Amino acid sequence: MNSLLTKNNQTAIMLALEKVMATFEQLPLDTIKNFWNPEACRVDLLPYLAICVGVTLWDDSLTEKQKREACKNAILINKQKGTVAAIKRALKALGLNSAVIEWWQNNMPPMTAQIILQENEAIFSDAQYEAIYKLVSEVKRLSLHVTFVKQSAIRNNFYIAGSFLETRRIRIA
């Protein structure tokens, strides 16, 4: 490859950068134009968009729709970072049924909050709780102390059977 760099600028890093920049000329214009749009970005470029917009929890096993939603939510979460709204949006993005109660709403010590996590269908694993804690830690403001409260509302049908036997004692005198 013929380099446009002068001899004294042809370091390994500069040559690698020049090679990468040359590939941009071959990209279709709509790929570059749609990169920042989570709805229109190419699927193979979604992990790079996720890095750019600051997605906290990324998993390659997610569906395409979930990846696009994660990118879209990350943009909104980062705009609101440090607020309770950001915590609520982050928990909702994970698909969690939760409520956030701040100190002034429930007679708690100042600068504290409770996050009530509803376990409706299944009980969370330790890894899931760790992921939730990591996500909340990244979006909350540093001065806010957060405690988690678990509520289980697992519904199932229970069948109860019983019997009643009436006995009478007869006293013979």
Image: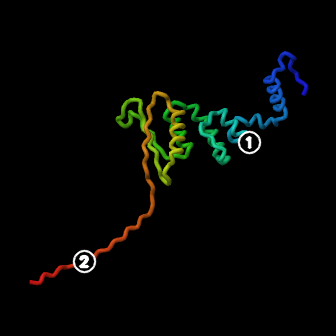
| Picture residue at 41% right of the left edge, 32% below the top | 112
**Residue named by callout 2:** 166
Look at the picture and state if 9 lies above or below 59: above
Q: Residue furthest left?
A: 173
| Nearest to the observer: residue 13 or residue 116 | 13
Q: Residue furthest front?
A: 12
**Residue 50 placed where, x, y %?**
66, 37
Between disc 1 and disc 2, whose residue precedes?
Answer: 1
Q: Quadrant of the N terminus?
A: top right
SS at badge 1: helix
Residue 132: mark in rendering: none
- Circle 2 packing at 10 Å, graded few (<14), some (14-19), many (20+), is few
Residue flagged by tag 2: what amino acid is it?
Glu
**Residue named by callout 1:** 44
On screen, residue 154 versus residue 32, left or right, reads left
On screen, residue 116 versus residue 54, left or right, reads left
Q: Residue furthest right?
A: 2
Look at the picture and state if 108 lies above or below 172: above
**Residue 82 placed where, x, y %?**
51, 30
Real-space Cα distance between discs 1 and 2? Answer: 74 Å
Q: What count of labels does the image hold?
A: 2
Q: Quadrant of the C terminus?
A: bottom left
Are the two marked residues, 1 and 2, in contact with CB atoms closer than 8 angstroms?
no
Which quarter of the figure has residue 31? top right
Residue flagged by tag 1: what amino acid is it?
Asp
